[in-house]
Amino acid sequence: MSGQSQAAVERAIVARRERVNEAIAEELPIEHPERLYEATRYLLDAGGKRLRPTVLLLVAESLADVEPDAVDYRSFPVGDDAVDVMKAAVSVEVIQTFTLIHDDIMDDDDLRRGVPSVHREYDLSTAILAGDTLYSEAFQQLLETGADPEHTNAAALELATTCTKICEGQSLDIDFESRGAVSTDEYLEMVELKTAVLYAASAAIAAMLLGADEETVDSLYGYGLDVGRAFQIQDDLLDLTTPSEKLGKQRGSDLVEGKQTLITLHAREQGVDVDDLVETDSVEAVDEAEIEAAVERLREVGSIEYARETARDLIASGKDNLQVLPDNDSRDRLEDIADYLIEREY
């Protein structure tokens, strides 16, 4: 990815993130009871790149073939009608935040986005209620876009199906923790369900609301599915290859904690005893030399490169799916986002 393309995609993400953040403040005001609504807004206000809503907005722009800098997302042109695609963008970001709150509860994590997790900042009961509130709020937003009722129903069904798939993916991830043998195919299925389907839904929902044909919707769903899986694989790689001070946590923490990743699963298939790569079983106690030795072993058997190549293949496949879109700047930015997701650093 050229420096010019990276700068363009970062500008595209920042510009849309700012507008999504403004919409979140408008659509999710802090009301009575204040503690509940403060908790629902807590992680949303803590930050985030807003990649999923950015994908949704870019797909809408490209399909409508409009000038990105001049478009009114609140009154988006669809034939003779107008659709509030910003509400749809808020919807997918709210679902993402709902999943993060509940993930942190299940994993008993202390931090998220550099701040205490919701159940730490408030309490467990309030965090569960905040997640549930966000879940229902997401559907309310999606049902209020003003799109054709048939298109709205299709989009709502897609979002509901996506939420079920995310739960299935989370269940598989939990199951993997107690299993000695997991195949790379099983891992990719889990990543697809837990992470990639929301990227896929973000792209597809935009097309649905605008009344695109089935082939276009399916191709855009495929784009999101491929880049979403590549995104997770890149996260696995960054955990091993990025210095701790840049990563914001101990490098190799996934390896120390015994988490299943595409890298470690491939290494097992090459005969590596992954459990013995790191003797220290505490993230706080492990040192850089031990992690570096483990990473070098993973490099030697080709597991690092295997993960990188898998991510590259997924990105190439995802970008091919964008051929259904008009050739315009917004499609270019969707292609750039695909590359950005596997070339990004912390």
Image: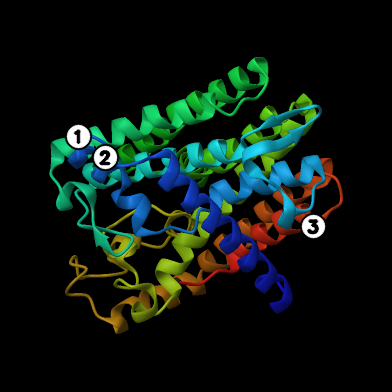
Instruction: Label 1, secondary structure: give it.
Output: loop
**In the rendered image, the vertical position of residue 135 relative to residue 29, given as above or below:** above
Please rate how many residues cluster around mark 2, counting C-alpha atoms within 10 Å: few if below 14, some from 14 to 19, many from 20.
some
Name the residue at the top extreme: 150
Amino acid carrying mark 1 in the image: Pro
Q: Position of residue 105 (x, y in %)?
A: 22, 43
Residue 207 seen by the camera: yes
Q: Which mark is residue 19?
A: none
Above/below status of 249 relative to 319 = below
Q: Earlier in the sequence, mark 2 or mark 3?
A: 2
Residue 98, quarter of picture: top left
Q: Is residue 316 visible?
A: no
Q: CA distance from mark 2 to mark 1?
A: 7 Å
Circle number at residue 33: 1
Residue 230 location, quadrant: bottom right
Residue 242, position as x, y percentages in the image = 43, 76
Tell how many labels. 3
The quadrant of the image that shows the C terminus is bottom left
Q: Residue at x 46, y 68 (%)?
A: 238
Numbered badge on residue 37: 2
Task: Looking at the picture, tell me which residue is in the foreground, 186 or 110.
Answer: 110
